[in-house]
Amino acid sequence: MDDEFPVIEEFRQKGIYNSPISGQNLYHLAVNSSWNHLIDLQQLIKDIFSNQVCKEGLVELSGLNTPTKVLSEIKKGNLPDIVIYDWEYPDAPIHSLKSKEWLLKILRETNAFVFVYSKMRDEIPRFLNTAEFSEFSPRFQLFLKGGKIESSFSAEEFILQYVIGAASKSGKIKIDGIDIEFTANNYLSSASDILYLQRILGNQYVLDELNKIHFSIDDASIEKILNDSNGFLLFNEEKNILIDPDEIKITEKLSPCIKLSFLEVVKRYSIKTLEETLERGIFPLIND
């Protein structure tokens, strides 16, 4: 979902931009048009459409240029499994509440996993760190368009592997071209969850640790990888929130806090909760 898909006269005359743009047409735009500052999205479309999961019909890729069109499709019963959600639009600049309201509607009216995908990522957490989004926290992820954390996947690489993993439901995922064998366990629900582990701990660390265990993921290997990292979060019982220890101003205001290792966080909550806390700095927990 993006308002800056390249506009070509042939497609405009056919009214292609007025309804969901098919995967074939998105691929045509990706191959034949200039995407200027959206080259990372351009490459992501190429990678998804040319992947085996698309060729086998396991993924149906489509594009829409406004959130209102997405919501209209949802009302028609066309429910997405994954949404790549651009935050800024001409009638909804970065500080507008419209994007927040549209996102909430998508989360409420579908079971989709939503990648909030924006060049202005650092401006967005204040809209998402609210009670309204707490119940949906396992179902959305904030990413920087074209962003790459040192020694980590780019946003686009993560999204691609997530889509492939969700569609194929295979027991493998690739990290730097290496097949990682996955066995269902108490910490990761699917092979694509390995990507959260990689973003939390860094690409090289995860590869080095996986090499020690013959590139196999199960309960024991997850516990070892998390324990050996020596990472931890802080938990404030009064406010029922998790805090990244690097957020000094927050921890000073909310002391005393309990120290929880990465493994304890994953055992109590989830790998997604750990990743979200590190991404956002603070994570409000939902009372049972």
Image (cartoon, rainbow, N blue to C red):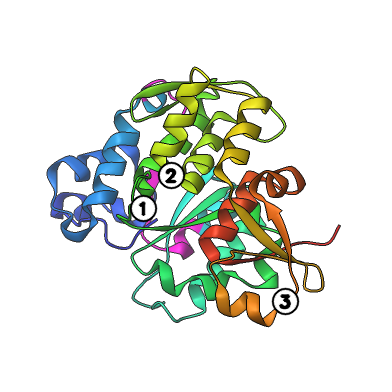
Q: Position of residue 102 (x, y in %)?
A: 54, 67
- Left or right of 84? Residue 17 is left
Question: Disc 3 and disc 1: Cα gap in Å?
Answer: 30 Å
Q: Position of residue 238 (x, y in %)?
A: 82, 73
The residue wearing badge 2 is: 202
The image quarter in which residue 105 lies: bottom right
Question: Disc 2 and disc 3: Cα gap in Å?
Answer: 29 Å
Question: Tag 3: Cα neighbours inside 10 Å, few (<14), some, or many (≥20)?
Answer: few
Camera-side residue of 19 and 94: 94
- Judged by depth in the image, the label closer to the viewer, 2 or 3, is 3
The residue wearing badge 1 is: 149
Q: In which quadrant will I find the N terminus?
A: bottom left
- Left or right of 236? Residue 119 is left
Q: Position of residue 286 (x, y in %)?
A: 77, 61
Q: Which mark is residue 209?
A: none
Q: Residue at x 34, y 41 (%)?
A: 22
Inspect the image, locate mark 1, and give the three-letter code of the amino acid beneath it: Ile
- Give whichever of discs 2 and 3 has the lower sequence position: 2
| Label 1 SS | loop
Report if the CB atoms under discs 1 and 2 are less than 8 Å apart.
Answer: yes
Residue 226 shows in this picture: yes
Placement of 102 over or under 23, stated as above or below: below
| Label 2 SS | loop
- Left or right of 262? Residue 214 is left
Question: Disc 1 and disc 2: Cα gap in Å?
Answer: 8 Å
